[in-house]
């Protein structure tokens, strides 16, 4: 029984459930430990090893989520700020949603990892979240999910219907470009060049009119290309010019790591590109995120 072969997809599943890559790794370790201890009780006639592992992982996640608050992004907590000069005070008491490093799982397991989608599912009750991930993303049958959750098929179908309606209302079902799309990559390349050149005008030209910029753990967020541009002017005035970037992907979306003029890692930025324009940039400044993405703390 090769449990390790399933580690990557189980990590992606647990991440969708809890919104934290580091916690997902711990939950997968607990899942595999439980599976190893119960291996003598596994019945191949009742379920595949994969289905059995997902049942264990689901129980582990649901237990971990008992009494928990959701992991939000700043845009899920209140209205956008209209002051790009506001103090950038981190809110360390909020368990922020974290990004997922694509390199930690196979490309065919990255469905349902979009930041906006994961953020939207965080609002769902834990069992409803499990249903929508298991049914809509992982494509388990209603009967399999009912067994995993120890409930009935009608209850699973009802929970799925409610979850899909909630996600549709949140706009989380919208189609966005893939990071390997040629047009998307060209947009990100131009953004990276403009960022390194501290060319705010060029950055703004790459944005949609209602582009969102948010920066967990800072609870502020901005909407609109004008405020986005004014904030970027502030960044370059505060930290200087001569930044460097590395392009990568996160949550199945294009991303870049930004390094300050003195070569220190500063942020991981995850982009949503729609219609050849950047509509959303989530900027993460948590050192634990840098560790998850194996980003060097200094590049020169």
Image (cartoon, rainbow, N blue to C red):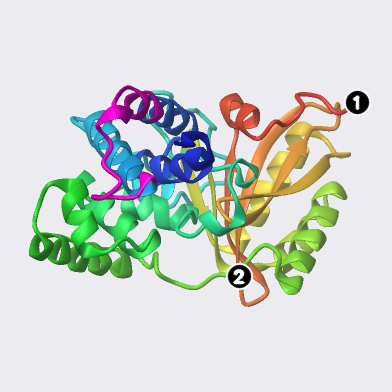
Q: Quarter of the image for the N terminus: give it.
A: top left
2 or 24, which is in the foreground?
Answer: 2
Q: In the rendering, at what x and y percent does residue 27 appear?
A: 38, 29
Q: Secondary structure at mark 2?
A: loop
Q: Crowdedness of circle 1 by 10 Å Cα count: few (<14), some, many (20+)?
A: few
Rendered position, 235 above or below 142: above
Give the percent coordinates (x, y) of residue 104. Answer: 60, 41
Q: Position of residue 249 (x, y in %)?
A: 66, 51
Of all residues, the one furthest to the bottom in this rendering is 275
Residue pointed to by mark 2: 177
Residue 274 part of the magenta segment: no
Q: Which residues are magenta?
A: 32-49
Disc on res. 98: none
Label 1 to label 2: alpha-carbon separation: 33 Å
- In this rendering, which labeled residue sits more in front, label 1 or label 2? 2
Percent of width and height locating residue 244: 84, 40
Position above or below: 237 against 281: above
On the picture, is 120 further left or further right than 116? Answer: left
Q: Is residue 38 magenta?
A: yes
Query: Left of 64 or right of it: where is 278?
Result: right
Instruction: Check disc 1 and report the residue beneath it.
Output: 300
């Amino acid at each position: 029984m090769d449990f390790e072969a399933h580690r990557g997809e189980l990590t992606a599943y647990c991440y969708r459930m809890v919104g934290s890559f580091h916690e997902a790794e711990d939950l997968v370790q607990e899942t595999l430990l439980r599976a190893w201890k119960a291996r003598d009780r596994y019945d191949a006639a009742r379920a595949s090893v994969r289905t059995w592992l997902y049942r264990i992982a689901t129980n582990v996640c649901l237990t971990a989520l008992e009494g928990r608050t959701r992991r939000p992004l700043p845009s899920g907590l209140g209205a956008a700020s209209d002051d790009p000069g506001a103090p950038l005070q981190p809110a360390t008491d909020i368990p922020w949603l974290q990004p997922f490093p694509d390199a930690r799982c196979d490309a065919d397991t990255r469905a349902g990892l979009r930041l906006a989608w994961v953020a939207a599912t965080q609002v769902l009750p834990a069992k409803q979240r499990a249903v929508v991930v298991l049914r809509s993303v992982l494509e388990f049958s209603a009967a399999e999910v009912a067994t995993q959750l120890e409930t009935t098929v009608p209850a699973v179908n009802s929970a799925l219907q409610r979850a899909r309606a909630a996600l549709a209302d949140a706009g989380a079902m919208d189609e966005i470009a893939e990071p390997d799309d040629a047009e998307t990559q060209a947009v990100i390349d131009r953004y990276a060049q403009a960022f390194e050149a501290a060319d705010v005008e060029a950055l703004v030209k790459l944005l949609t009119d209602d582009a969102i910029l948010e920066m967990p753990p800072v609870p502020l967020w901005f909407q609109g290309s004008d405020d986005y541009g004014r904030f970027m002017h502030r960044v370059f005035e505060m930290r200087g010019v001569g930044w460097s970037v590395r392009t990568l992907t996160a949550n199945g979306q294009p991303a870049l790591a930004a390094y300050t003029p003195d070569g220190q890692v500063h942020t991981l930025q995850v982009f949503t590109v729609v219609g050849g324009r950047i509509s959303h940039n989530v900027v993460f400044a948590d050192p634990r995120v840098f560790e998850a993405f194996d980003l060097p703390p200094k590049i020169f």
